[in-house]
Image (cartoon, rainbow, N blue to C red):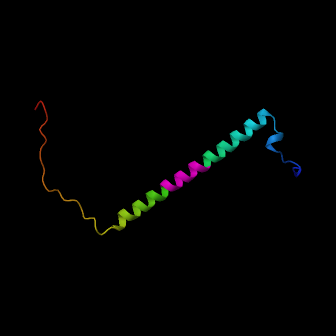
Amino acid sequence: MDEPEEGERRIADLNLLGRLVYFAGQSVRVTADLLESVIKLAADTYVEAEKAFKQGLDPNVDDANIIDEHRKDTPGS
């Protein structure tokens, strides 16, 4: 196996505390990347929905029309 360069360490060479710190750091990095991806996806979806709403991209959707209104009888009145 190649020897690590100066300043590099292998996970196998770390003690228990070093491994815990290493894996905690990796967990934080992965969580941050996932969170960033989810936020970006949500923002892109919001922007596209806003754009579609303002442009009225779907010509098959008409404005809503009220056909009939009924007063709902509530108990006790």
Query: As rendered, which of 76 and 37 lies closer to the eye?
Result: 37
From what the image shows, is residue 50 above or below residue 3? below
Q: Is residue 63 magenta?
A: no
Image coordinates of residue 13 in percent, x first then y, are: 84, 40
Image coordinates of residue 46 in percent, x first then y, are: 44, 57
Taking 51 as reference, is 5 left or right?
right
| Image point (12%, 44%), residue name | 71
Image coordinates of residue 37 in percent, x first then y, are: 56, 53
Taking 58 as reference, is 22 left or right?
right
| Image point (45%, 58%), residue name | 45
Stretch of the chain drawn in magenta: 33-42
| Image point (40%, 60%), residue name | 49
From what the image shows, is residue 56 above or below residue 4? below
Q: Give the main secondary structure, helix, strand or loop, of the magenta stretch.
A: helix
Quarter of the rendering containing residue 63: bottom left
Q: Which residue appears farthest toward the front when viewing the image? A: 1
From what the image shows, is residue 32 above or below residue 47? above
Taking 10 as reference, is 65 left or right?
left
From what the image shows, is residue 24 above or below residue 60? above
Quarter of the rendering containing residue 10: top right
Q: Quadrant of the C terminus?
A: top left
Q: Which residue appears farthest toward the top when viewing the image? A: 76
Query: As rendered, which of 42 and 26 lies closer to the eye?
Result: 26
Image coordinates of residue 38 in percent, x first then y, are: 53, 51
How many marks the image carries: the answer is 0
Taking 45 as reference, is 11 left or right?
right
